[in-house]
Image (spheres, rainbow, N blue to C red):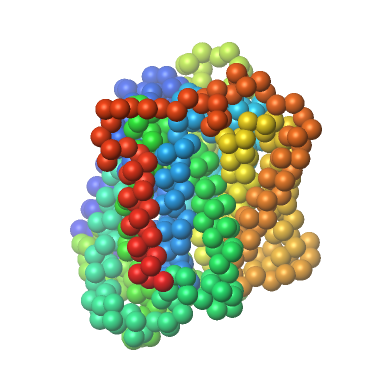
Amino acid sequence: MKLELIDYLIIAIYFVFVIGIGFLLKRQVKSANDFLMSNRNIPLWITSLAFISANLGAQEVLGMAANGAKYGLYTVHFYWLGAALAMIFLGVFMMPFYYGSKARSVPEYLKLRFDEKTRTFNAFGFAAMTVFSSGVSLYALAMLMEVILGWNFDLSIWVAALVVFVYIFMGGLTSAVYNEVLQFFLIVLGIAPLVFLGLYKVGGWEGIVANVQDYKLHVWKGLDDPSHNPMGVDAFSMVFGLGFVLAFGYWCTDFLVVQRAMISKNLSDAQKTPIIAAIPKILMPMIVILPGIIMLALQNKFSGFELPVTANGDANYNMVLPILLQKLYPNGILGVGITALIASFMSGMAGNVTAFNTVWTFDIYQSHIKKNGSEKHYYYVGKIATVAGILISIMTAYVARGFNNIMDLLQLVFSFVNAPLFATFFLGMFWKRTTGHGAFWGLICGTATATMTHGLTVAEGKGGWIANTHEYFSGTSQAFNIAWISFIVCVIVTIAISLVTKPKPEEELVGLVYSLTPKQTDSNKIWYKNPLWMGVGVLLVTIIFNIIFF
């Protein structure tokens, strides 16, 4: 792909702008609370856009386009089944506990609800997951620069990592959040014309229907048996594995996204943040999934849209979006499209690094290394953690090279970490009898079960490092099943151990458990601004979409 001067200028302006935001906010960041938590002073519209943008990284922009080509419309389940309901649940039921408890992170809430060992286990697991996800974003960016622009892979990794490092190091979480808002608009404006041009070239939706296999153009039809749909899943693993376990595990317990709601000015804004974010979320398939389906239609109608293959001979679905950019965008607009992709990768990386430095500082360093340090001391620790997070992300970027679909890789990671964690949260918030010992050993056994299940099963050549007892149709199918299996094991172990160990006194659980927390009432609240009714509206729209594309 050949870029002209105008394209390079657009990319350069973007880099200058994001770094400039970091320098402008530097003077406002004077303490650990400012650097790591933005002093809980971010407006609602900013937190809502940052909430969705923190998830709008490489795994969504690049990975969902790949999934669209690989699995067709079944990919929209990641939104209409695997996001909307969980985001509503977070806003209505869980944010009052997170925000009201004054916890600075998800692991810190676990400490308040259970005990220190449960917090520590989750903190280390989450820290590992964030730098791994950050590395995936970094790998995707470097791959893009190498393949479509001819830039050196290693150099691209270091340059991109340096830019993210500078604006986080200068402005902390506030800088990351404001950049995420900028990146949200860049991503939408940069990719939306691609969808329009692709639809025009292929002949609109009628052209897609005529050139794409019918079994890839449904959402629910074909889920009666794994062999009847390209994703290789059945209705149970889709609804329970993705729609319940993975969806709620990610949106309700992953500190990367929850942190954006926790920095709101007040509880009302904290509750509304994920629900408002759910509105553009359910519309995002038109931007991030439809390009993959358009690619399928273009491949059948024209030559020149073939995907390259990986070293093991599989189609490299990660290249769907770069090829469409190369084939459909003229210069000028091409610069905007490339900048949109760069923005998505940096958004995902920055979100993960800011979550990592907060958890490391508060939940690992302060809890186990230096408990009574000054605000200034933890401020510097947070900066050092930022450096470490960037360096580890660079190392994990090279691990991601072995996967032909980064979304499959990330779903596998989530099935190990978020699936058992959601079981712990669900029981802890809604069953006052859950104990710290039960939660800790439930997490241990759930994670171990996920590891064993992966070792005993195979999907697309991945897994089976213990024995091959079952082969799944796809990596996504394997991840969904690992998720619900580890969830159930965590629930069973947590309940069993909680029944034979002593729970915390009820007075210590007020504000942490649903049945022991006074319900909030506001007689002056306008009904359509109530988080519950806002959530119901979003849910109704989601149901309608599912019916239309059944």
Side of 355 where 372 appears, left or right: right
Decide: is 118 above or below 540: above
Nearest the viewer among 29 and 92 is: 92
Nearest the viewer among 64 and 518 is: 518
Which residue is at a point 75% across and 26% down the rendered structure image? 502
Relative image position of residue 49 (x, y in whole percent): 32, 43
Side of 544 where 513 appears, left or right: right
Tell me if residue 363 can be seen. Answer: no
Nearest the viewer among 177 and 338 is: 177
Which residue is at a point 24% across and 72% down the rendered structure image? 197
Decide: is 69 above or below 162: below
Relative image position of residue 531 (x, y in whole percent): 35, 39
Q: Name the residue at the front extreme.
A: 523
Tell me which corner region of the image, top left, top right, bottom left or bottom right, holds residue 313: bottom right
Which residue is at a point 56% across and 74% down the rendered structure image? 224
Tell me if residue 424 can be seen. Answer: yes
- The quadrant in which the N terminus is found is bottom left
Give the number of marks. Answer: 0
Relative image position of residue 421 (x, y in whole percent): 61, 43
Which residue is at a point 45% across and 44% down the rendered structure image? 89
Tell me which corner region of the image, top left, top right, bottom left or bottom right, holds residue 474: bottom right
Relative image position of residue 276 (x, y in whole percent): 32, 44
- The quadrant in which the C terminus is found is bottom left
Nearest the viewer among 110 and 174 is: 110
